[in-house]
């Protein structure tokens, strides 16, 4: 891979992040209301409100004072202090909600990737068969359903009706704090949201893999493998499947943004203490620094995911680098 190709991709990624930072600064300050009014304290005097605005820097002009201050602090990693969480640093607030989201979405992506790719490969290899019609039909239904639509029936069935699993949260209040008990408790709370995320992602992986396998079946090396007398199962998993994985590199990066967006509604349904729930709380409180920090993190995550996909795609397919 040439250095020019890598530099171009890095430069575009940096440009995208910078543009996102500037856009977020403008959009969040166009929102109705303001943090000092969102405190909802009827006893606060005008002088106290003015003191709060001065403390948060809201008394200064947007351009250039607040913009310069915001960009300078962001570059140095200082995302400011949360209004809602009593002046706690934004990085600490986000850090506390980050790992539950990573746990949920990371495991969900992994499970969906394995099951979705396998389902799509079998469906595409047996195109037109009852197995294909059933697998493709299930994939289309799952792909069309939002995460929270999948999650609510799971709650009603397994939590409310059968009382097998917790309805919400990440842990049981007052549960023993020893390691094994904690892991078991978190695992029990994780099952339903993890199932919802995995089912919601399986459809996309399956549909794309099915299409890729169908195209791969027409390649000459597949015909050659069959002429050699190799069994269909070996041809599928040894020859067709690895070559059909190339389009999945791009899909994984693209789906990353959809996963994050869907996680916001899913975490609300399951009251999961992650980035999605934190985003809704910050919106309700007009917590600009916290919102900016969250969206900056999400934007950088999506940009980095697409950058990695571009670089990996360039390594796997030399035609892309040209």
Image (cartoon, rainbow, N blue to C red):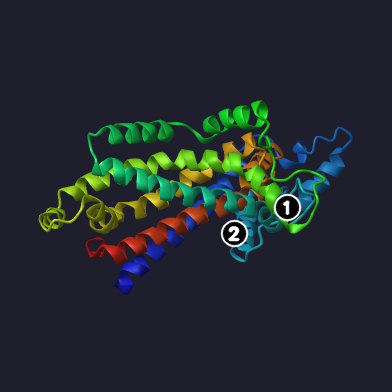
Closer to the camera: disc 1 or disc 2?
A: 1
Residue 26 visible in the displayed image = yes
The residue closer to the viewer here, 2 or 144, is 144
Residue 88 percent across, percent down from the top left: 76, 55
Which quarter of the figure is the C terminus placed in?
A: bottom left
Residue 305 percent across, percent down from the top left: 45, 57
Q: What residue appears at the point 89 percent right and 34 percent down from the top-left corner? A: 43
**Extreme bottom residue here?**
3
Residue 315 lies, with reference to residue 35, above or below; the image says below
**Extreme right residue here?**
43
Residue 251 percent across, percent down from the top left: 37, 49
Which quarter of the figure is the N terminus placed in?
A: bottom left
- The dot on residue 71 is 2
Residue 194 percent across, percent down from the top left: 56, 43
Q: What residue appears at the point 54 percent right and 49 percent down from the top-left corner? A: 105
Q: Badge 1 local density, few (<14 within 10 Å), some, or many (20+)?
A: some
In primary-sequence order, the first of circles 1 and 2 is: 2
**Residue denoted by label 1:** 182
The residue closer to the viewer here, 168 or 20, is 168
SS under mark 1: helix
Residue 180 lies, with reference to residue 163, above or below; the image says below
SS under mark 2: helix
Residue 312 lies, with reference to residue 293, above or below; the image says below
């Amino acid at each position: 891979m040439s250095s020019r190709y890598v530099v171009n991709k890095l430069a575009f990624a940096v440009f995208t992040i910078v543009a996102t930072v500037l856009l977020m600064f403008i959009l969040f300050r166009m929102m109705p209301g303001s943090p000092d009014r969102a405190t909802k304290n009827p006893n606060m005097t005008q002088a106290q409100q003015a003191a709060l605005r001065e403390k948060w820097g809201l008394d200064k002009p947007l351009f250039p004072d607040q913009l310069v201050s915001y960009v300078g602090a962001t570059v140095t990693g200082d995302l400011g202090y949360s209004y809602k969480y009593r002046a706690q640093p934004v990085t600490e607030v986000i850090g506390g909600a980050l790992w539950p989201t990573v746990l949920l979405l990371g495991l969900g992506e992994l499970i969906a990737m394995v099951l979705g790719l396998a389902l799509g490969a079998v469906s595409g290899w047996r195109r037109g068969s009852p197995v294909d019609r059933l697998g493709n039909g299930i994939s289309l239904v799952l792909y069309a359903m939002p995460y929270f639509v999948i999650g609510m029936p799971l709650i009603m069935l397994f939590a409310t009706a059968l009382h097998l699993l917790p309805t919400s949260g990440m842990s049981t209040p007052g549960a023993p704090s020893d390691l094994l008990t904690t892991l078991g408790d978190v695992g029990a709370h994780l099952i339903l949201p993890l199932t919802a995320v995995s089912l919601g992602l399986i459809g996309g992986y399956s549909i794309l893999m099915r299409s890729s396998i169908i195209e791969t079946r027409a390649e000459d090396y597949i015909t050659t493998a069959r002429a050699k007398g190799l069994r269909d199962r070996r041809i599928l998993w040894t020859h067709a499947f690895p070559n059909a994985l190339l389009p999945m590199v791009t899909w994984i990066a693209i789906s990353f943004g959809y996963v994050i967006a869907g996680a916001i509604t899913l975490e609300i349904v399951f009251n999961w203490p992650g980035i999605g729930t934190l985003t809704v709380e910050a919106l309700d409180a007009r917590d600009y620094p916290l919102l900016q920090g969250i969206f900056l993190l999400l934007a950088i995550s999506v940009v980095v995911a697409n950058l990695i996909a571009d670089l990996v795609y360039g390594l796997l397919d030399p035609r892309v680098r040209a």
